[in-house]
Image (tube, rainbow, N blue to C red):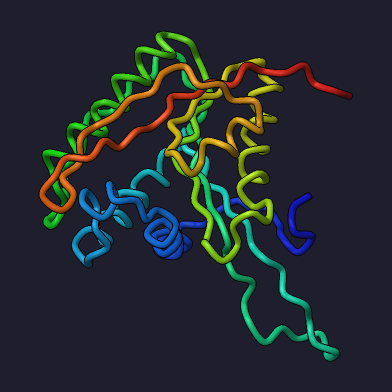
Amino acid sequence: MPNPNFHLLPAKPEDIPIFADIFFSAFQSFFIHECLPDIPSVRNWWIKSQEKEFQDPDNLFLKVIEKKEKQNDGSNDEEDPIVAFAKWTKPVKGRKIPPQPEWPEGCNAQLADAFFGTLSDGHARVMGERTHWFLALLGTRPLYEGQGAGSMLLAYGLRKADEEQLDAFLEASPPGEPLYLKHGFEVQERVSVMVPVDGQLKPYKNALMVRKPKPLVA
């Protein structure tokens, strides 16, 4: 069961810089350090990119907050922190996977093109023309991992997919794969790119996963 103080809410545009904090603290793989290091130019690019994505009505941004207890006088000394966020892309028939963006200064553009191009090609190959829900991003603050925030964000989109009897698709990094397996996703393919680490090339793998819709229980 999720932490009882967690609450799922629609995100607001002003939440995006906080989502950047979560993204760069949650994703700490050798791939991210090489491809999208947490430096001002990359962080600013990430924020602007997600702010643009927020304006697209086909994208659904969600957040989980931790509700803080009120004082005896009813006041609350601190804001309810955002502990996790997700971006679901709604099903749109015939939607084209967008081309790769212009990468920011400080990004390993060659690696980014190779990796995200591989994911985009895999997405198209696995899903074909099928209309589906797509979990594009999910991140949880490390302090709150394992407390159910990710499951809450997943459950919202999966409920929508079940209501519409549509598949759900995502690309899972190795740490995230167990959570997605628990929620009914199955690995369709594994893809990888070679990442330069300490003068050597190291494979970074992701799983392309699909969940079939489940019958709704009244």
Placement of the C terminus among the 4 image quadrants: top right
Question: As drawn, is 31 to the left or to the right of 212?
Answer: left
Question: As drawn, is 142 to the left or to the right of 76?
Answer: left
Query: Which picture quadrant has residue 172?
Result: top left
As drawn, 174 above or below 2:
above
As drawn, 214 above or below 115:
above
Residue 181, position as x, y percentages in the image: 60, 30
Residue at horizontal 50%, vertical 21%? 187
Most foreground residue, 85 or 179 = 179
Residue 154, position as x, y percentages in the image: 62, 39
Query: Which picture quadrant has residue 41?
Result: bottom left
Counting every numbered tag in the picture gives 0
Residue at horizontal 63%, vertical 24%? 161
Query: Which picture quadrant has residue 55?
Result: top left
Residue at horizontal 85%, vertical 23%? 217
Question: As drawn, is 31 to the left or to the right of 4?
Answer: left
Residue 4, position as x, y percentages in the image: 79, 60
Residue at horizontal 66%, vertical 18%? 213
Outermost residue toward the top in this view: 129
As drawn, 130 above or below 40:
above
Residue 50, position as x, y percentages in the image: 36, 49
As drawn, 121 above or below 110:
above
